[in-house]
Amino acid sequence: MLTASGINFGYRRTIPHMLGILCGFNVLIIMGTLGVGSLYESLPQIEVVLKILGSLYLVYLSYKIFNAGRVGLNEQTKGSERPMTFFEAFLFQFVNPKGVVFAMAAASVLPTEFSLSESIIMVSICSFISSIISTNVWAIFGTLIAELFRDQRKRQIVNTILAFLLLATIPMMVL
């Protein structure tokens, strides 16, 4: 998603999306560390709901990526393309089953010799650092690809490939 945003909107306009991921995922990690993950484990139906919501949202995002920057859009949709906002990216972390499972896993492997507050600080710092690196790599990669694919036809091919790759993550996420 960040690669597509980097391609279509550039690095600077992708920053709110990146910050939403950073903050949302960090909150998810903290919640997992605080034990919200046990709620998730005790109510397995939550996982099904998250998978459905996350899958539907990925289908929607794939559609948006597929249509991003298309020439000949009707007047109602023309100019309505925009990068994901901070709030949208933040909220997406909570319906992303991979993120929820990762947060639970991170919370379950904490060393027992640390207090809860020390554990939260350690996990948050590690999560924040790795998220900063990964979000920047994907957004910069998209920005670099955009430089190579300034031609509208090539851009459409890249958007189509990225949209289908995003759709391809759904079965992996659901399983």
Image (cartoon, rainbow, N blue to C red):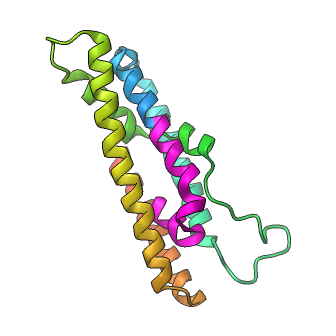
Q: Quadrant of residue 125?
A: top left
Residue drawn 67% across the image and 79% down it: 70
* Nearer to us in this view, 7 or 42: 7
Look at the magenta stretch and give its main secondary structure: helix
Instruction: Locate residue 155, reporting x and y percent.
Output: 54, 82
**In the rendered view, would you say 60 is above or below 40?**
below
Q: Can the viewer see residue 47?
A: no
Q: Quadrant of residue 47?
A: top left
* Nearer to us in this view, 127 or 32: 127
Magenta-colored stretch includes residue 17:
yes
Span colored in magenta:
1-24
Is 53 positioned to the left or the right of 40 in the image?
Answer: right
Instruction: Locate residue 53, reporting x and y percent.
Output: 54, 40
Residue drawn 51% across the image and 75% down it: 160
* Nearer to us in this view, 151 or 59: 151
Is 13 positioned to the left or the right of 107 in the image?
Answer: right
